[in-house]
Amino acid sequence: MSEISALQKVRSAYQPKLPAALRAGAKVVVTKGNPLPAFADTEKISQLFPSTSNMPDLRFAAGSGEKGEAINAAVILSGGQAPGGHNVIAGIYDGLKSINPNSKLYGFKGGPSGLVDNKYVEITDDFMDAYRNTGGFDMIGSGRTKLELPEQFDKARENCEKLNIKAIIIIGGDDSNTNACLLAEYYKAQNAGIQVVGCPKTIDGDLKNAFVETSFGFDTACKVYSELIGNIARDANSAKKYWHFIKLMGRSASHIALECVLRTHVNKAIISEEVAAKKQTISEIVNDLADMIAARAANKENFGVILIPEGLIEFIPEMKVLIAELNDALAKNAEKFAAITTNAEKLAFVETLLTAESAAVYKNLPDAIRLQLSMDRDPHGNVQVSLIETEKLLVELVKKELAARKSAGTFTGKFSAQTHFFGYEGRCSAPSNFDADYCYSLGYNAAAILGAGATAYMSYVGNLVKPANEWIAGAVPLTAMMNVEHRHGEDKPVIKKALVELDAAPFKAYAAIRADWAVNTSYIYPGPIQYFGPAEVCDQTTETLKLEHQ
């Protein structure tokens, strides 16, 4: 057996807390609500999902502890890692065993492709116990294969039938749970006898809505990043000579950046959704940063911390237009571009392909960023936005702006910058007590959904700012979260991504105080995740959830 750390050894004994509705086991009393239409495009969603649309939400209450029929189920981890995934599987496993000790759980390896390729492991007591309360997805691995084609569904059904599997639980984000809904619809329409249930996962926090208060992993990842940000802020306040530009994960939404600034009170968090709403140019963003740096320099504080969402560049209207033009122009001129040998000639060639407006934006960017925009393409020929070093871009442009101000005599301070990108550091951390409890409850609750005979539902655990005993357990139809979006030239049903809402409490709380934090040094140092001690330290949830529930 491989060695484990002292923390992991003690942590393995932690028994996650459950909502009252699940404490007597996963055989629960079910109350049905009213039929729920799709989030939007109701008619189209009803046509695409005739067997699983307009179903009621389900609410669970504690059962009598009676046993039910044994259930053989499959579990899949889909997409990027998030703290607590192993506890979701532990909750499923224990929940199924509470229904009937003869129930079996199979973990399909490497994500959705494992279900199609029939790569699996039967999860047993000893196997499960080695992964309780641990981070990572290494128990069975994950993958990004999409389950959306009938031949995939048929192959998965064939593999399930060999093991007498009657249910599939997909642990993933909005795209993965959209695929879960497609799978559930296909099996229900065919009367295949296979239930499909989803669990909401993503550290980005963009799988949330009126039904799902938060996705699992967001709490832990933000606490990890906030510890690092707090450490850097204290270093900045100690050395008093560097501005730290920190890029954070979150390509589609700025939830992580917002949560981390609320936890650490650093000088600035750029919120992509606000940039888009105000139609800010990159020059306006740079000028705002330069104004803040100059204001602090006037107070003899030539240091600070700025948080930048990973996907910022796609929210800046002029950059969005530029990227679209580059994608189109370079796809049409790929051979000519590839034939050019020097970088200078490549950049000059690209300028000739752009409109005057986009060429002006492109020309003003540092050469390194222009090359990233022009040369780092995905297999479809599109710019790989996640690889663009936005933090370095902003440093270079701010440095240029401040140099111009210094020459004009309007800036007399100093500017030295350090850049960071926090992403993978937070995805596989040992889950916080909140995520350990929430994930275990989501998994146990998924077993309750199976025990209730339901399909095409997402596991729902709510009232999350209260102690776990007061959490609400139930299920929400996957179609109730869906709308139709135009992707890659086609209309596709997808679960709606949740962006930061500028009129919601978390952003408004930041907007009300950010002018003060920008100029004054108001840093808070959250420190590392605490697993042992008073509940107000160990079991606290995110600032975002607290503000949303006020």
Image (spheres, helix red, strand yellow):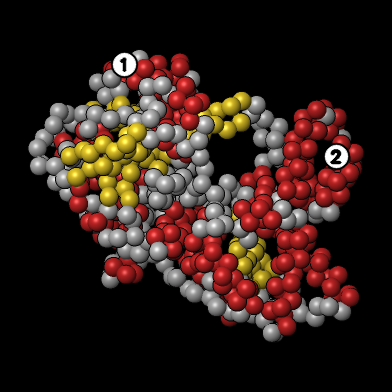
For the C terminus, the quadrant is bottom left
Please determine whether, in this image, residue 419 is positioned above or below residue 436: below
User: Element type at marker 2?
Assistant: loop
Q: Is residue 434 left or right of residue 418?
A: left
Q: Position of residue 411 (x, y in %)?
A: 81, 78
The residue at the point 83 percent across, 29 percent down is 333
The residue at the point 74 percent across, 76 percent down is 294
Q: Nearer the viewer, mark 1 or mark 2?
A: 1
Residue 176 shows in the view: no
Q: Is residue 476 left or right of residue 233?
A: left
Q: Which quadrant of the figure has residue 547?
A: bottom left
Q: Position of residue 331 (x, y in %)?
A: 77, 30
Q: How many marks?
A: 2
User: Element type at marker 1?
Assistant: loop
The residue at the point 67 percent across, 58 percent down is 391
Disc 2 residue type (three-letter) = Leu
Disc 1 residue type (three-letter) = Asn
- Write down the residue under mark 1: 191
Q: Residues within 10 Å of mark 2 (few under 14, many from 20)?
A: some
Q: Is residue 331 left or right of residue 44?
A: right
Q: Position of residue 34 (x, y in %)?
A: 32, 36
Q: Specify which label sits upstream in the sequence, 1 or 2.
A: 1
- Write down the residue under mark 2: 354
Please determine whether, in this image, residue 327 is positioned above or below residue 275: above
Please determine whether, in this image, residue 532 is positioned above or below residue 422: below
User: Which sits in the foreground, 171 or 186?
Assistant: 186
